[in-house]
Image (cartoon, rainbow, N blue to C red):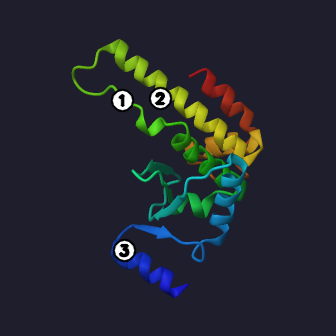
Amino acid sequence: ERDELSSAFSATGPSSTRVRLRRPMAPGLFALLDRCVQVLGLKAPVDLYVLNDGAINACVVTTRDRRIVIDVTAGAINQLEASEMLYVLGHEIGHALLGHLETPRAEGENTTGITALRSFALQRYEEISADRVGLLCCDDVYTALRAEFILTTGIINRTALGDVRAFQIGRAHV
């Protein structure tokens, strides 16, 4: 384990806020990733990184050699329950599997209003489809809704959380 940790720090530098995780460093997180990979029948290799950030968030990129690279914040790892993390990992893998990272974005000064609106709508569709992949991994709609609520609001106090279905109804009216 010490060698794994040393190589992770030497690769990114000791003052880096991003560290590549290895199985011995975070076996529980890799067990969740393994579950998502199995449920989705994923063949592509997945690398996990932790960002030293207290916010609850994650993001994904793909590499030229078709690796999926997921960055998860320390805040997400420290504060999400395992079932919620399954949803987050699945959501991020969904973006990669569904080709969302290759979608051209309409941005810039010369973007017309209708083009910007279409681009926004496409991004929302992509988020919804990635949400569905996250749901496949966590296999519980209430867990998926709770994870979305936590990611959107930052509220993690489980005793303060009420009926997560109300959050979904509230989002529909925004």
Discs 2, 1 touching: Cβ within 8 Å: yes
The kind of residue tagged 1 is Arg
Q: How many marks?
A: 3
With 59 as the anchor, is 141 left or right in this view? right
Q: CA distance from mark 2 to mark 1?
A: 9 Å
Looking at the rendered structure, which numbered label has been put on residue 11?
3
Residue where numbered disc 1 is placed: 105
Image quadrant of residue 145? top right
Foreground label between 3 and 2: 3
Which quarter of the image is occupied by the N terminus? bottom right
Quarter location, residue 127: top right
Q: Residue at x 44, y 69 (%)?
A: 19
**Regarding mark 2 in the picture, which secondary structure is present there?**
helix
Mark sitting earlier along the chain (1/3): 3
Chain-order first, disc 2 or disc 1: 1
Compute the Cα span from label 1 to label 3: 32 Å
Residue that protrudes farthest toward the left in the picture: 109
Q: Is residue 116 above or below residue 24?
A: above
Image coordinates for residue 168, horizontal then vertical, percent = 67, 30
CA separation in Å, label 3 and label 2: 34 Å
Q: Residue 8 placed where, x, y %?
A: 43, 75
Nearer to us in this view, 149 or 159: 149
172 is higher (above) or lower (below) than 41: above
Tell me residue 89's x, y (percent).
Answer: 60, 51
- Name, please, the residue furthest toward the bottom: 2
- Residue tagged by mark 2? 123
Q: Amino acid at mark 3?
A: Ala
